[in-house]
Amino acid sequence: MFLSIIFLVGGFLILILGADKLVDGSSSIAKKLKVSSLIIGLTVVALGTSMPEFVVNLISSIKGSSDMVMGNVLGSNIFNVLCIGGLTALVFPIVVKKSTVYFEIPITIIASLAILFMSIMGDYLISRFEGIILLSCFIAFILYTIVLSKKGNNLEGEFEIREFTLLSSIIRIIIGIIGLTLGGKLLVDGAINIAHYMGVSERIIGLTIVSVGTSLPELATSMVAARKKNVGIAIGNILGSNIFNIFMVLASSAIVRPISISNDSNIDILVSAASVILLLLLVVLGKKFVISRVSGFILFTSYVAYIIIILFSK
């Protein structure tokens, strides 16, 4: 048990360090290739913050741990909206753009419901073909985002891109890949062993410990953005991560190995969709599309209530 905890904690630290180095190296090279900071932020940086979920799910999928795959994706999405969104609004109220209300939020809801539809219509299974469909949606979303960004319609704030020498950038990328691979394996092995030792399902471990750990980059990004009062990036980071988790992370996992979905996971899918619907209602009902501190408190306490329910339901 002690060794499994060491694997889990060490895996988290190495995973986050690996994602950070990969983003730094990739962003620096993209900058040298004259790619704009805006595009780098919307692609490389956004993808980088989702790499922990991606690596953990890829390893879990190879091991055949479908409950861990679903728990990590859905747990991360719920944590992003309710906990990170709530905490960010508590630090500084979030002003939400109309494009976010009319595009990103509905896309996030549709993506969650699409998984439920695939589950029910496919005998509680997300097949490789359905994974390809989801991945195609991810590519379309990225292209659409880039087109909007070039028109100056899709992003509030600027991303700061650090530049390094070419050799230093390559070294960071290599360290990042090694860190992600090693950290992901340690984390998954530790989490599965802890689940077996404690007699709880891999789904519960995925929904709680693993999902929170892999969402730390999003939490750090959003809290820093809120502290700098650049909350446009914070809300975009939250919703973008949720979309990536479904269209890229879950899709890639299904392509590696079809994902079986339990009845409990179907409930988690509904909670994931409901959390975004709650966010939408708070935005629409708020003054001038603002997520106030009161709304932030509602989001955060909803997450705490959800965690208490799933922990005491088994």
Image: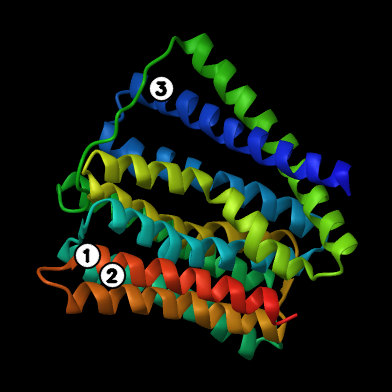
Q: Residue at x 58, y 55 (%)?
A: 212
Which quarter of the picture shows residue 75?
bottom right
Task: Classify 10 Å Cα crowding around label 2: few (below 14), some (14-19), many (20 and above).
Answer: many
Q: Secondary structure at mark 3?
A: helix
Viewer-side residue, 283 vs 298: 298
Residue 120 versus residue 67 in the image, above or below: below
Q: For the residue marked with disc 2, what is the amino acid? A: Ser
- In the image, farthest residue toward the left: 288
Residue at numbered disc 3? 28
Please say whether residue 174 is visible from this viewpoint: yes
Residue 16, horizontal then vertical, whole percent:
58, 37
Q: Which circle's residue, 1 or 3, is located before the other in the chain? A: 3
Task: Classify 10 Å Cα crowding around label 3: few (below 14), some (14-19), many (20 and above).
Answer: many
Residue 148, horizontal then vertical, whole percent:
22, 53
Q: Which circle's residue, 2 or 3, is located before the other in the chain? A: 3
Residue 270, horizontal then vertical, whole percent:
52, 83
Residue at numbered disc 2? 295
Viewer-side residue, 153 vs 305: 305
Task: Classify 10 Å Cα crowding around label 1: few (below 14), some (14-19), many (20 and above).
Answer: many
Disc number placed over residue 89 in the picture, else none: none
Residue 172, horizontal then vertical, whole percent:
56, 20
Position of 4 with respect to 148 (left or right) is: right
Q: Report, in whole angstroms, how far the alpha carbon at label 1 lies from the one at label 3.
A: 36 Å
Q: Residue at x 36, y 60 (%)?
A: 85
